[in-house]
Amino acid sequence: MKILLITGGSRGIGLATVKEFLNNKYKVITTSTSGKIPLQNENLTAYQLDLGDPDSIASFIKKLNDIKIDVLINNAGIANKKEAKIDIDELRRTLEVDVIGMVSLTTQLLPSMNANGVIINISSEFGSFTEDWGNRVPSYRIAKAAINMFTRNYYDAEEVKSKNIKVYSFDPGWVKTDMGGPEAERDPEEPAKELLALAESGKESGLFYRGLKIRDW
């Protein structure tokens, strides 16, 4: 069985994606800040992980015991949807978790990834430079734009190319999550299905996708 590692699997898109991959015969490793998720399955293992804490990242990687990963989905993150203007403390915390922690985890996990694997970084249309959302949730948007740049940079790293690993940014759209709210257009199950399809698609690396279609940065 192939192995998926997805961070932030306790709710929203993360939990829906855990279920989707389990239903398609993957073993799934996931994380939450508490180490618990509201789901049990013989092919599912959950660990505690705080991406804002380097010691937590190091401890989590040690617990994996050199498990080989086929698909890594960087989903965990924080967001303050009430932030109406730049708050430096909020920005610092968001970047520490959503960007620095995610990049640290990904680069440390690369040796544990199988050749021909896939890395998907969950981004957002809010991180796009081609769409104008005004002065809304600035820390979240800055972080998502940075995630896109990581994708654009990392796909071409020699250590990634040598293993033929594809790296994607993924825009899930407006989803009914804590961030998206109950009035959002999509249920979490929709991007979950798209994430499975993208992971198995063999699409061109280093690009920003909405479903299986390339979207503008």
Image (cartoon, helix red, strand yellow):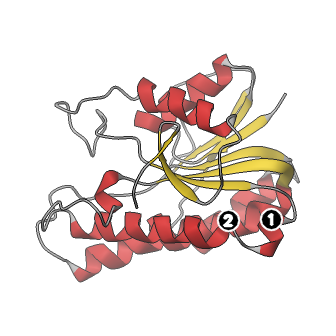
Measured from the top left, where is residue 78 in percent x and y?
A: 37, 58
Amino acid type at mark 1: Lys
Query: What residue is shown at x 53% (from left), y 74% (from top)?
Result: 100
- Residue indicated by mark 1: 161
Residue 105 sits in quarter: bottom right
Camera sees residue 179: yes
- As rendered, which of 64 and 72 lies closer to the eye? 72
Pointer 1 local density, CA inside 10 Å: few below 14, some 14–19, many at least 20: some
- Tell me the number on the disc at residue 155: 2
Relative vertical location of residue 109 with respect to residue 174 in this rendering, above or below: below
Q: Quadrant of the C terminus?
A: bottom left
Query: What residue is shown at x 67% (from left), y 36% (from top)?
Result: 201
Camera sees residue 55: no
Pointer 2 local density, CA inside 10 Å: few below 14, some 14–19, many at least 20: many
Query: What residue is shown at x 62% (from left), y 64% (from top)?
Result: 56
The answer to whether mark 2 and mark 1 are in CB contact below 8 A is yes
Relative vertical location of residue 116 with respect to residue 2 in this rendering, above or below: below
Dot placed on the residue nearer the N-terminal end, 2 or 1: 2
